[in-house]
Image: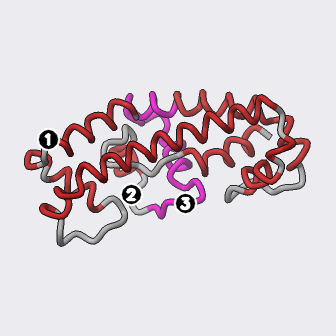
Amino acid sequence: MRSAVVAAVVLCAIPAVAADHPCKADVEKFCAGLQPGQGRILQCLAQHEADLSAGCKQKRDSFREQMEEIRAACEADVRKFCSDVRPGDGRIVRCLQQHANELSDPCKNEGEKMRARGQAHRALLQDVQQACRDDANKLCSGVKPGGGRIARCLKSHQNELSQSCTSAIGEAKDRW
């Protein structure tokens, strides 16, 4: 049951490995060539757990703590409403969402915390996009968007970025 809740929430809670994510180098080192999705990157990192960098281990531990809080808060709801649902591909999360009005208060509260974290993360990304739009147009005009290519381009030009872009990136790093 524990792994079903964690696996379901992982699909909604894990952001893509961004340019400065503490696990980026570990993903590149141990999981190069793996197609993201369906937990493949997480499984790869778990297989190399002993060899992960300190920063990645810290991020993993923080994430595990959050997942344990969600698991503890929602375990009874998963048993009650989703016992016949096969875990994977977000099915447990969708089941819980379908029963949103019936969930226990602790599970609802954890869901709200998760949504708030997601909204805060999206707001940070939007702030960075807004602040760095002119820099991206100027320095990365030939780069096809998607897959983190613009972020990598901006990083390769970090000494040429405007103050507003540099500040927005710094603030996002501090808050993320």
Tell whether label 3 touches label 2 (CB within 8 Å): no
Q: Is 107 left, or right, of 47 in this rendering?
A: right
Q: Which residue is mark 1?
A: 163
Dot 3 falls on a residue whose secondary structure is loop
| Residue beneath the point at 45% across and 51% down | 16
Please report the bounds of the magenta region as a residue range: 34-60
First along the sequence among labels 2 and 1: 2
The stretch drawn in magenta includes residue 55: yes
First along the sequence among labels 2 and 3: 2
Q: Quadrant of residue 103?
A: top right
Which circle, 2 or 1, is nearer the viewer?
A: 1
Amino acid residing under circle 2: Ala
First along the sequence among labels 3 and 1: 3
Q: Which residue is mark 2?
A: 32
Q: Position of residue 85 (x, y in %)?
A: 84, 55
Gap in angstroms between the C-alphas marked 3 and 1:
35 Å
Q: Which residue is mark 3?
A: 37
Which circle, 3 or 1, is nearer the viewer?
A: 1
| Residue beneath the point at 38% across and 28% down | 54
The quadrant of the image that shows the C terminus is top left
Most prominent secondary structure in the magenta stretch? Answer: helix
Gap in angstroms between the C-alphas marked 2 and 3:
14 Å
The quadrant of the image that shows the N terminus is top right
